[in-house]
Amino acid sequence: MSKNKLAKFADMANYPHVFQETEFESLETPHEMKGHWKERFFHNNNPIILELGCGRGEYTVGLARMFPEKNFIGVDIKGSRMWTGATESLKDNMKNVAFLRTRIEFITRFFDAGEVDEIWLTFCDPQMKKPTKRLTSTYFLNRYRQFLKDNGIIHLKTDSNFLFTYTQYMMDANHLDAVVLTRDLYTEAPGLNLSPEQLSLLQIKTYYEQQWILRGLSIKYLAFALPKEGVLVEPDVEIELDSYRSYSRDKRSALTKAH
């Protein structure tokens, strides 16, 4: 029988690589780790990669196994899910993994300018009705700019036609060129001219991703570089609903751009 939420929270309160910060006085008050993750926690000068909305932490842990020369931090507000990856990485004594429990809206409180090299967004809620809550909206991109290195890479992997196409519109509106873009990753990957490193990291499949694949849904992936300079604008587009419901999410939407 799996542990209940309170037991998981009690576990993580004692995990040395888990930082749980859900309440604080002000967003302007920096967390003690801001600007110090490499020296105080990882004890190296390796690149830092974030997984925002990490859920169970499959990507955080999977990428950390593939790339021991890089540091990975999974971020989510749902601690009972995060417990899975946090427990696995602790049992395996992984030194390049950390987890941060907080709302992504508060993310700038934890990382300093240029401290993060890349961001992964894996199967995050597409937030059909709340544009500012979409993790690829300009609302969040402007936050990422505060700690992502100039032209740092943002990866999006999703089952949602809505979020994928919305992100395309956002990129078009802001002249952000795709490094990689595909609407059917596992079918098109051989023709995408990906490096061996890219091919290997894209083979990690989260629990929910495997469920969506079994349902016959294509997995979409794109990556783009985010420059620090320039004003970002939201795309002004019409949005339709997706044609399916996805587990605990509300009915979602797809845009009219090519499917």
Image: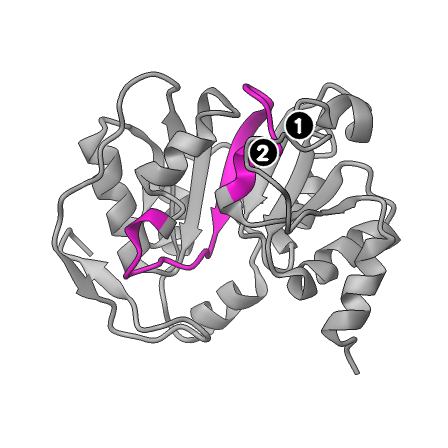
Query: With 247 as the anchor, is 113 left or right in this view?
Result: right
Q: Residue furthest bottom?
A: 1
User: Looking at the rendering, which quadrant does residue 107 occupy?
Assistant: top right
* Image quadrant containing the C terminus: bottom left
Q: Residue at x 64, y 51 (%)?
A: 22
Residue 36 vertical position relative to residue 71 in the rendered view, above or below: above
Q: Position of residue 192 (x, y in %)?
A: 37, 39
Crowding near pointer 2: few (<14 within 10 Å), some, many (20+)? some
Q: Quadrant of residue 27?
A: top right
Kindly identify which residue carries mark 2. 109
Q: Is residue 195 above or below residue 80?
A: above
Residue nearest the observer in this picture, 135 or 60 = 135
Q: Look at the image and name its color scheme.
A: one colour
Q: In x, y percent, where is residue 34? A: 66, 27
Looking at numbered disc 2 in the image, what kind of residue is underneath it? Arg
| Residue 55 badge | none
Quadrant where the N terminus is found in the figure = bottom right
Q: Residue shown at 31%/56% (left/top)?
A: 130
Is residue 167 among the parts visible in the rendering? Answer: yes
Residue at the limit of the structure toward the front, as seen here: 25
**Residue at x-position 75% and y-position 54%:** 86
Q: Inspect the magenta stretch and tell me whether residue 108 lies in it.
A: yes
Q: Is residue 196 visible?
A: no
Asked whether disc 1 touches disc 2, contact meaning CB atoms under 8 Å apart, the reply is yes
Q: Earlier in the sequence, mark 1 or mark 2?
A: 1
Question: Residue beneath label 1, please?
Answer: 34
Which three-letter amino acid code belongs to the residue tagged 1? Lys
Spatial distance from mark 1 to mark 2, Cα to Cα?
Answer: 7 Å
Answer with left or right where residue 52 lies relative to residue 256: right
Q: Which residues are magenta?
A: 106-132
Q: Is residue 141 above or below residue 22?
A: above
Q: Is residue 136 above or below residue 76?
A: above
